[in-house]
Image (tube, helix red, strand yellow):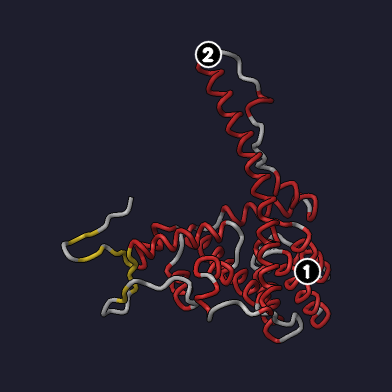
């Protein structure tokens, strides 16, 4: 429960560093949210530091929840503020954008329903284990691990790129410091947001802006030592295959606001391949 005041006559607020720590995000992300009109601080101190009151924290909570649903930042702003916050009723030309958002939500709804089923199986599994242990019964291995699909991504990586790729990637990631992991996640977040924003703005995949994003995407891929982006002659096929996977797999498409955004990424990567590889 959030406190309502710290001293008489002043509403409680939290510094940007405190909010970043509490929300599990970064000060840089919060500043970006302010820059794009998504989350303004409730006040700015004389030293220039941003501070956030309880209302701002509630809004941030909603932003983070919508991000977990796979929405891009422009869609989150629309969901929170409605069209009136951006100049009144949406013009008819925004119909495609609305349709794209609906499709993205439907894709994520399917994933959420599958997750709900998986979590229900996990809950039932744990409940059976507790009941069995309390009653002194014999634990059944087949019942204990229903819904625990921890090898899902491991198997996918091994199927696509081999067991060595998964092992090297796992070793690389677990060897990073917490600061390095945070920096990597921030980089991915910014890239995903920029892709989503460009797609929703109708940017041409062959434009300079889209190709700059494609270049950043390749640079990001090449920071991971375990993937085929480093192999001579493999980058072309790797990028084309990734582009198709982004579109075909709803889990990846959600990173770019849905199928429409993922299609934009795929097409931009195709142009990058044609021009550079």
Residue of label 1:
239
From the top left corner, tell me how far across and down residue 254 is, in percent. Answer: 66, 61
Q: Is residue 135 left or right of residue 243?
A: left
219 and 203: which is toward the camera: 203
Q: Hey, which quadrant is residue 6 in on the image?
A: bottom left
Q: Residues within 10 Å of mark 2 (few under 14, many from 20)?
A: few
Residue of label 2:
135
Reading the chain from its start, which is encountered first: label 1 or label 2? 2
146, above or below 105, in the image: above
215 and 87: which is toward the camera: 87
* Image quarter hosting the C terminus: bottom right
Q: Is residue 140 left or right of residue 182?
A: right
x 32%, y 65%: residue: 53
x 66%, y 39%: residue: 117
Residue sitting at the far bottom: 208
249, above or below 92, in the image: above
């Amino acid at each position: 429960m959030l406190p309502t005041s710290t001293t008489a006559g002043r509403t409680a607020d939290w510094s940007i560093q405190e909010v970043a720590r509490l929300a599990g995000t970064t000060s840089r992300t919060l500043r970006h949210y302010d820059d794009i009109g998504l989350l303004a601080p409730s006040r700015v101190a004389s030293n220039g530091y941003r501070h956030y009151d309880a209302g701002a924290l509630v809004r941030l909570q909603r932003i983070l929840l919508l991000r977990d649903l796979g929405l891009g930042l422009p869609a989150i702003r629309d969901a929170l503020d409605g069209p009136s916050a951006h100049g009144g009723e949406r013009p008819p030309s925004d119909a495609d954008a609305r349709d794209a958002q609906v499709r993205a939500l439907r894709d994520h709804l399917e994933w959420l329903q599958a997750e709900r089923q998986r979590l229900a199986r996990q809950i039932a599994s744990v409940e059976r284990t507790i009941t069995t242990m309390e009653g002194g019964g014999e634990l059944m291995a087949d019942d204990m691990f229903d819904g625990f699909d921890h090898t899902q991504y491991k198997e996918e990586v091994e199927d696509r790129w081999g067991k060595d790729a998964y092992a090297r990637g796992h070793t690389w990631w677990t060897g990073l410091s917490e600061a390095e992991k945070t920096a990597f996640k921030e980089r991915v977040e910014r890239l995903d947001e920029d892709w989503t924003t460009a797609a929703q703005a109708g940017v041409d995949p062959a434009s300079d802006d889209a190709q700059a994003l494609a270049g950043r995407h390749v640079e990001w891929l090449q920071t991971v030592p375990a993937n085929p982006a480093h192999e001579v002659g493999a980058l072309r096929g790797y990028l084309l295959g990734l582009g198709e996977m982004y579109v075909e797999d709803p889990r990846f498409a959600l990173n770019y606001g849905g199928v429409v955004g993922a299609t934009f990424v795929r097409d931009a990567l195709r142009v990058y391949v044609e021009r550079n590889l």
